[in-house]
Amino acid sequence: MKKWIHSYRLIWIIGGIFLGRASLALPYSYPAVRYISPLGHSLGGMTLPLSAETGNALFNNPAALSRNTKFRAEALNLNFDLNSSILGSLSTSTGFSSLGGFTSSLNSNVNRIFSGGLGNLTAVSWGGLAVGLLLQERVRAYSDGTTVNYETTSNLVPAVGYGLALARGVVRVGYSLQLVSQASGVAQAPSNSSAAYLSGISEGKGLSHTASVNFVFPYTYTPTVSLLARNLFGMRYFSRGLIPRASSPIGTPASEPMSIDAALDFTARLSGPIKSNWYIQFKDLTSATSLALLDKLSFGIDLGISQPVSIRLGLNHFQFSGGIGYRSEFSEINLAYYQELTPFPAISKWDTRYALQYKVFIQDKNSRDRETENQSK
């Protein structure tokens, strides 16, 4: 066992030297990804091939909207996440509205990161057309004893998209338009400050164009190949947000270049009722951002051990993730465990996070079998 651990550490060090381990993880190195569900987090940060989720398709793979020929509404898609430090401090006051309400916990745990987030993505689709609204708030902070360092992301994003099936569903194309309103940034404040987490960050809004194409073969257990272009023609933030969030913003967020993702997924039966969905995603093919190679590659497997229950495993940047999901006729619950690299240079390390997704949907016809849902119509 010790020999294996030493070998693992050696591989990690070598990979860090040659593949840029110090680069930041999502969403900082790759800000074009605005929504990752707990399901995606459990699969190594997967986004592009998760076509079964209407909201995810709208933001990360609009070609998959062509599957939704009948009415479907994800009336509630609530996502909640927190890290291990918060879990260990639930008995204390952990409000994120101001530094003053939380600095006692931060200052008594020097260089220990506390983080949490809450979001909801409501989406409706019918006949390939979809509209949705993403609301998302995330905060991460730590104290070095004299200064509180914090990172905030606040999103309000209405979106509309359309997917079209061609060649009897073998080829699917799609486009979505997102009006991104964002307040984000990394800032500092004295450890005895009562400043809000929305102080000292940038804010703005802008239009993001997303397009994708899927190649789906009309046979059981065959792969789907997907390509996605994010921020077509580039994206530039301007002005304040749709609903101003930042307190005295220091400017607008940095412009986001166009980038391209690719993914491969396929379904296979393992044994008896156990079915598996396998995913591989390669982010930023054109190296438009600072993502290191190990950040670009994600691997995931979704094991359907019974009709309503699935177990997931993922890998990204030598960090394992996992989760479990339960799907009924009108709702779905997903739990995830994953790692996220912090944006604080002084204590660059992984933030262990836990996420919960609760989704309520309405549709003309529903199958609890994710394999059936992933097959071409």
Image: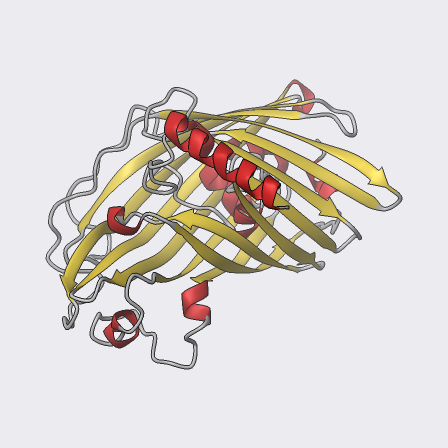
Q: Nearer the viewer, residue 30 or 64?
A: 30
Write down the quadrant of residue 259 in the picture: top left
Is residue 27 shown left or right of residue 216? left
Vertical placement of residue 46 versus 202, above or below: above
Please give the name of the residue rendered at 32% of the width and 74% of the height, measured from the top-left corner: 95
Vertical placement of residue 276 versus 118, above or below: above
In this view of the protein, can residue 162 be seen by the observer? Answer: no
Residue 252 horizontal/vertical position (percent)? 16, 43
Residue 16 horizontal/vertical position (percent)? 40, 33
Is residue 18 shown left or right of residue 243? right
Vertical placement of residue 144 versus 64, above or below: below
Residue 20 horizontal/vertical position (percent)? 36, 30
Q: Nearer the viewer, residue 44 or 7?
A: 7
Please give the name of the residue rendered at 51% of the width and 51% of the height, measured from the top-left corner: 338
The furthest residue to the front: 3
In this view of the protein, can residue 85 be seen by the observer? Answer: yes
Please give the name of the residue rendered at 86% of the width and 41% of the height, measured from the top-left corner: 271
Residue 9 horizontal/vertical position (percent)? 49, 39
Q: Nearer the viewer, residue 22 or 149?
A: 22
